[in-house]
Image (cartoon, rainbow, N blue to C red):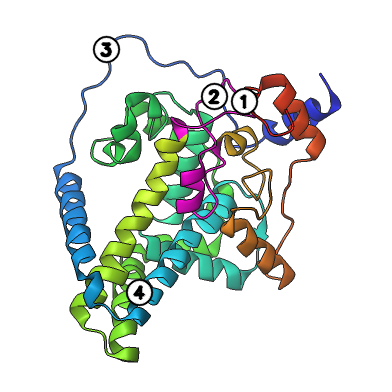
Amino acid sequence: MTEAEAADGRLMSDREDALDHTYRETEGPKPCRRIVWRNVFSMTALHIGAVYAIFLIPSASPLTLLWSLLCFLISALGITAGAHRLWSHRSYKASLPLRIFLCSANSMAFQNDIYEWARDHRVHHKYSETDADPHNASRGFFFAHIGWLLVRKHPDVIEKGRKLELKDLLADGVVMFQKRHYKLSVVLMCFLVPMLVPFYLWGESLWVGYFIPALLRYTLVLNATWLVNSAAHMWGNRPYDVTINPRENKFVTFSTIGEGFHNYHHSFPYDYSASEFGCGFNFTTWFIDLMCSLGLAKDCKRVSGEMVRSRVQRTGDGSHWSG
C-alpha cells in the first residue's frame, strides 16, 4: 500500500459516509413495494403545474425571470453547499451566519429537512447501489430519479439509517431549529418569498409569481438534484474508480451547479469541492471559496494530487485526462 492509499484509508475509516464493503443484502424474496399514493398525486400535480408554468413564461417580466434564476441558485446552494457538502460530508466548516443562510436556502429547496437529507445521504454513500441505498440506481433510472419517493423505504434503508452516528447534526442548533419549524420555513421560503417579492417590488401578478419563481423553479431544482441520483449513476466515465457505479456527467454538473463529478465524489466524499478541478464548472465550489475569503467558512478538506493520481492508476477506467 502506498502512502497516498494509506492516507486515503485513514481519512475514510471513521466517517459515516464511507462505503461499507461488509454489508450483504438479505437473500430471498424482496419486500413488496408499497406505493405512497399521497406522494404520487402530489408529484403528479407538481409537474403538471410546472408544465403549465412554462406557458406563462412569455407573460412574465424580465425581472421576474431574473428573480426566478436567483431563487434557483439560492435553493440549489441550500442543497449543494448546505445539506450536501457541509452537513452530510462535513467537508468544510461554516460560521453561524452562513449556516443560517444555507439553512434558509435549504428550506427554499424543499427536499426534506437538513437532518433527514443528510442522514439519507450518508446511508446512500455507505450502502451505495444496494437495498440499503434510499435511491438504489440498480433498480433503474425511474426509481433512482423519483420512484424512491413514491414508495415506502426498503427496511434496510430504515435500519441502517437508525444505526448511523449523527451527533454532529443533533448538536447543530441551526439544523435542529429547522427540523422543529420545517413546514413553516418551507411555506415561507419555498413559496411565499419567491411569489411575493415580484408582486411587491415590481408589480408582477401573484399568479405568475406563484407558478414561475415558486412552482416551476422548485420543480427544476428537484429534478436537477434527482439527476445526481439517476443519470450520474448510469451515464458517463469513471476515471477514478471503475468498481463503483457513479459517473462523471457534464450535463448533471451544469444543472446542479457542480455536483456531476460523481465518480470523483464517491471516491473522495470528504473533498469540499466534490471535484478534482476546483472552481471549474463548479459554482458551488466558487461560492464556498468566496465565503472563505469573507471569513464565513474555513477548514476546507481537499484531496492531494498524489492521492488522486494513486487512485486513478489503481482503480480508474483509463479515461482520466492525465491518463
| SS state under label 1 | loop
| Bounds of the magenta segment | 233-262
Q: Which residue is located at x 55 percent, y 53 percent?
A: 87
Label 1, label 2: how far apart the Cα atoms are? 6 Å
Badge 2 crowding class, 10 Å Cα cut-off, few under 14, some 14 to 19, many 20 or more, is some
Badge 3 crowding class, 10 Å Cα cut-off, few under 14, some 14 to 19, many 20 or more, is few
| Location of residue 131 in the rendering, given as x and y in whole percent from the top left corner | 38, 24
Instruction: Indicate which disc, 3 or 1, sits on the residue closer to the N terminus.
Output: 3
Q: Amino acid at mark 3?
A: Pro
Residue under pointer 3:
29
Identify the image quadrant of the C terminus: top right
Label 3, label 1: how far apart the Cα atoms are? 31 Å
Label 4, label 2: how far apart the Cα atoms are? 39 Å
Residue 181 as seen in the image, left or right of residue 80 = left
Residue 241's label in the rendered image is 1
Label 4, label 1: how far apart the Cα atoms are? 40 Å
| Location of residue 174 in the rendering, given as x and y in whole percent from the top left corner | 52, 65
Q: Mark 3 vs mark 2: give the one in front.
A: 2
Note whether 61 is above or below 116 in the view shown.
Answer: below
Q: Mark 3 vs mark 1: give the one in front.
A: 1
User: Within the magenta stretch, is there residue 245?
Assistant: yes
User: Which is the main secondary structure of the residues drawn in magenta?
Assistant: loop
Using the image as rendered, state which of residue 6 and residue 165 is in the foreground.
Answer: 6
Residue 244's label in the rendered image is 2
| SS state under label 3 | loop
